[in-house]
Image (spheres, grey):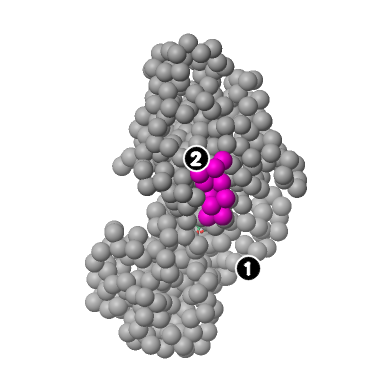
Amino acid sequence: MHISIVGSGYVGTTVAACFADLGHTVTTIDIDDSIVAAIEAGDAPIHEPGLDELVAEHGGDRLRATSSYDIIPETDLTMLALPTPSRDDGSINLQYMKTGAESVGEAVANQNSTGSDSDPHLIITKSTVIPTTTDEQLAPAIARAGLARTQDFLVGSNPEFQREGSAVTDFLNPDKLVFGTADERARELLHKLYEPLRERADDEIPVVETDVAAAEMIKYGNNAFLASKVSLINDLGNVCKEFGVDAYEVANAIGLDDRIGAQFLRSGIGFGGSCFPKDTNAIIAAAEERGYSPPMLNATLRVNDIQPERLLKLLTKHTDITDNRIAVLGLAFKPGTDDIRHTRAAPVIDQLRDHGADVAAYDPVATENMREYYPDITYTETASDALVDAHGAVIVTGWDEFAALDTEFDTMVDPVVIDGRRIIDRRDGITYEGLTW
Ligand code: UGA
């Protein structure tokens, strides 16, 4: 098949490269010329393990990039993988999706005006959007160019469940595929699109066939459930801490119950990233607009806010932070990425500064990104540099290298370590507190 993907961010680029690897011809469309040039030259425009190899192999060949929408009518289907950022009130901003949908509609209409008699063009929403968005907002935006739904174009939703840092392997080994569409022809095209993936997979990949709005909701359900699982184990972890119980021992045991499952039970400083905070906020805002304020999902966010506050309380219990140097180890929202979106390091640094601390921050890869938002704090080249003369250290990201820190703690004025990720071992010579253990 020949498919077009509008938007070459994290999702668009990895999905495009993976589909090209499966044997399809893929053209990505992006307004950023540097992204287009990179893909055409076989260079991955973003860092994601395994992506360099795929783009090097297929870029400029089966994987093409352009800034023009003209290619769209020549392709068998188009995916919209554009950003869906948050507005200030947490609700979703559909501006990019709507503009993209309109441009796709115009491209399809241009071809129709040349008189060619083709099948309706299938447009699939890949980005995370609130249920009913594709049907009620994107389809009308596509139709604006004078197109008739079902006759000139079809719509569908095919959400993605990739994690940053393992997006390529997640795409190639999915737990499920979700095909949301009301149209049989669209469903057939989606089956055809994923056929090579299902052939390549060792195990049968379940396909969930459903309507568009349910597919859109499945994505929110997935992320809200996982975010809530983290907040629930953090909530329980805070209770554990009050009793001097190790939350990880408790989590290991409860995770043996198949109904609970062992994953996503790591308690600590909480969740960050481009998806859990944004998506939980967005689905709450959308539900509230319809008159229902979901108490559980609101609590998920509340617990996530509480964790950095508890970290700071533990720190101030053991050391005086005002006018003193405090080391913040880890700035990325999780290890393996330089992404700082919604990182827990932000509330930690904010609160430290509110208390007058002199923050010395270190991260192996995310420093430059953080510097943009926090230009006034000290950044160090190594974790040990951050610890020198510090009156306390807090661990925000679970980078493996922090586990190896040892005699470096001796350089601190006051060797107080508050661990938000359970990466440092308790040992003699330091005052160690785990957030939930
Ligand atoms: C998440 C989902 O896991 C993906 O399935 C989804 O496709 C993606 O969002 C998205 O919607 O695009 P991601 O944000 O890349 O993926 O990262 P995760 O590995 O899920 O971690 C999210 C946050 O939860 C991190 O800050 C991590 O440290 C935290 N977390 C995770 C915990 O605090 N404890 C855990 O046990 C697990």
Quickly name the residue at label 1: 249
Which quadrant of the view contains residue 68?
A: top left
87 vs 24, left or right, is: left
> Which part of the image, by quadrant, shows the N terminus?
top right
Neighbour tally class for label 1: few under 14, some 14-19, many 20 plus, Cα within 10 Å: few
Amino acid beneath label 2? Arg
Residue 174 is marked as none
Amino acid beneath label 1? Glu
Q: Which residues are magenta?
A: 51-62
Residue 198 forms part of the magenta stretch: no
Residue at 64% from the left image edge and 20% from the top image edge: 184
384 over 263 or under it: above or below: below
Residue at 71% from the left image edge and 52% from the top image edge: 258
Residue 135, image x, y percentages? 48, 23
Residue 64 is marked as 2
Residue at 43% from the left image edge and 13% from the top image edge: 113
Which one is in front, 312 or 399?
A: 399
Which one is in front, 359 or 415?
A: 359
